């Protein structure tokens, strides 16, 4: 006598899978924009923190050498002693900062001295790496960060 054995396969139906995908899609549409906003805000905070570090180092440079590095010497003057004129007289062996960070988008910070109306200007060109822009592509200046 043969026994009728019914095999029951366990698994998910197509409708159950579709319901789960719809729920995941709804969660992603709610959480995604919030994560992007937090990331954008974090990048701007990093730029402000870097500006603060640069300003502190530049103030020390000015106190010890009576001048700011010029545009040609750039922010590199905070890491290693400039060899172009005007050479600093009281440069510490370890420099003023251990290394020069890039902005959050991987681009180097820009430095101009003298600036338009200030003794210097430090700025980031934003996510796109070119002048101008809006949102994450907007330029940020050390003087904008104060406000």
Image (cartoon, grey):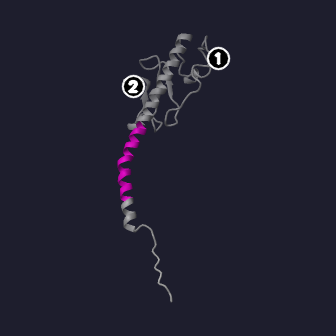
Residue 146 belongs to the span the image colors magenta:
no
Where is residue 33 drawn, in percent x and y?
37, 45
Where is residue 103 drawn, in percent x and y?
50, 32
- Furthest toward the front, the residue is 1
Residue toward you, 37 or 117: 37
Give the class, few, some or many, for how many residues have Cα within 10 Å of label 1's Cα (few <14, many ≥20).
few
**Residue located beneath label 1 in the image:** 93
Magenta-tinted stretch: 21-40
**Residue located beneath label 2 in the image:** 144
Give the class, few, some or many, for how many residues have Cα within 10 Å of label 2's Cα (few <14, many ≥20).
few
Q: Is residue 11 above or below residue 41?
A: below
Residue occupying image coordinates x 41% and y 38%: 40
Q: Secondary structure at mark 2?
A: helix
Residue 28 belongs to the span the image colors magenta:
yes
Residue occupying image coordinates x 46% and y 30%: 47
What secondary structure prevails in the magenta region? helix
Q: Secondary structure at mark 1?
A: loop
């Amino acid at each position: 006598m043969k026994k009728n054995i019914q095999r029951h396969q366990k698994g998910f139906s197509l409708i159950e899978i579709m319901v789960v995908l719809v729920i995941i899609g709804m969660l992603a549409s709610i959480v995604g924009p919030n994560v992007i906003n937090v990331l954008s805000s974090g990048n701007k905070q990093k730029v402000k923190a870097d500006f603060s570090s640069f300003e502190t180092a530049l103030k020390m440079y000015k106190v010890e050498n009576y001048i700011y590095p010029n545009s040609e010497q750039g922010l590199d003057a905070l890491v290693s002693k400039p060899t172009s004129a005007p050479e600093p007289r009281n440069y510490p062996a370890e420099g003023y900062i251990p290394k020069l960070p890039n902005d959050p988008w991987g681009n180097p910070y820009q430095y101009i001295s003298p600036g338009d109306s200030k003794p210097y200007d430090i700025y980031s060109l934003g996510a796109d790496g070119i002048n101008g822009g809006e949102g994450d592509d907007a330029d940020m200046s050390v003087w904008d960060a104060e406000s």
